[in-house]
Amino acid sequence: MKTLTRRMLALLALSACTTLALGQDFPSKPVRIVVPYAPGGTTDVLARFLGQRLSENIGQPVVVDNRPGAAEAVGAGLVAKSPGDGYTLLLCTLTTQAINPTLFPKLSFDATRELTAIGRVADVPGMVAVHPGVPAKDMAEFLAYLKANPGRNYASPGAGTPNHLATELFKKAAGVQATHIPYKGGAPAVQDLMAGQVDFMLILAPEAAPLIATNKLRGLAVTSLQRSPMFPNLPTASEAGVPNFEMVVWYTLLAPASTPKDIVTKLNRSLNQVLGEKQTQDKLAELSIKPAGGTPEEAMAHAAREADKWRKVIADANIRAEN
């Protein structure tokens, strides 16, 4: 028994030393950031810019690996089941931590237990955008139009997406009715909005910008509580008649929960350094993206608060993922 005990203690000590050495040597090879969306969208653009800046900070290549599908679950599940060595990370939206655990309780992984935060990356406001044929030049006219025409409709990239949930919250806050038309992705939803097949949509401000500039859509308000530098003359929804309404898509850098604390700390330090650089802040401001930052603990606490918020929205609107 004494011999067995000594062997077990020796193995534990060896494991501790190995973990410590791993943290001290990290990073010694390229780091992969999994993006749970196809190339070209806001998440992908943010990941590629962040990867470039992080690569310069940590002295190793940072590559982006697009793994779209199943409302972020394909990419998130891949990272959740990856080795916790700091070399496979996930850049995701609130969907993974704050929405999917309620909508998809039978996922093959538990985001709250199998993923841990490196840190919050950024906040991106939405935009209430309408087809130019909608007879409303501002939010007051639009709300009056919806109240007078309760059968109008709105698009989303799919049931349970942040766009969908936020629009349901918007309807409740504004006291209006509109029918949800879900699409299989953001691109076809926006295409039908531009074609006038649907009346309005809550989309991310960076994605709305070129469409508004070319008069393919009309922006009525941003959905953050502060005005956007990209649209300084556009009011917030709260200013324009929907009090306290806010829809901000937040992004977090996550790692497998088994990742050693010293590696998480190193990555968090690098992330905060990159987000604090003027070059980063100026570039993200051009895209109407606000850098976040902070500790891993703060990021996890934020996700928990947001999960409570969106759980209530899902219950109040009786939203089902299969709808």
Image: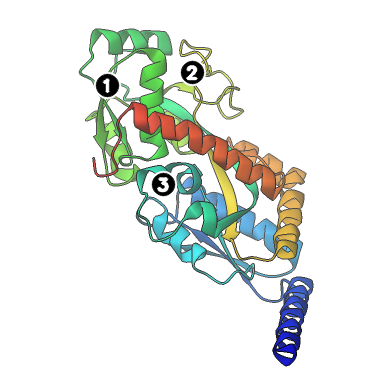
Q: CA distance from mark 2 to mark 1?
A: 17 Å
Coloured how? rainbow
Tell me which numbered mark, 3 or 2, is placed earlier along the sequence.
Answer: 3
- Residue 202 in view of the camera: no
311 left or right of 156 in image: right
The tag on residue 237 is: 2
Q: Is residue 5 above or below residue 172?
A: below
Tell me which numbered mark, 2 or 1, is placed earlier along the sequence.
Answer: 1
Residue 317 sits in quarter: top left
Q: CA distance from mark 3 to mark 2?
A: 26 Å
In the picture of the structure, the residue carrying the numbered disc 3 is 100
Secondary structure under the numbered disc 1 in the rendered image: loop
Residue 159 sits in quarter: top left
In the picture of the structure, the residue carrying the numbered disc 1 is 178
Q: Nearer the viewer, residue 115 or 91?
A: 115
**What amino acid type should be assigned to the residue bearing mark 3?**
Asn
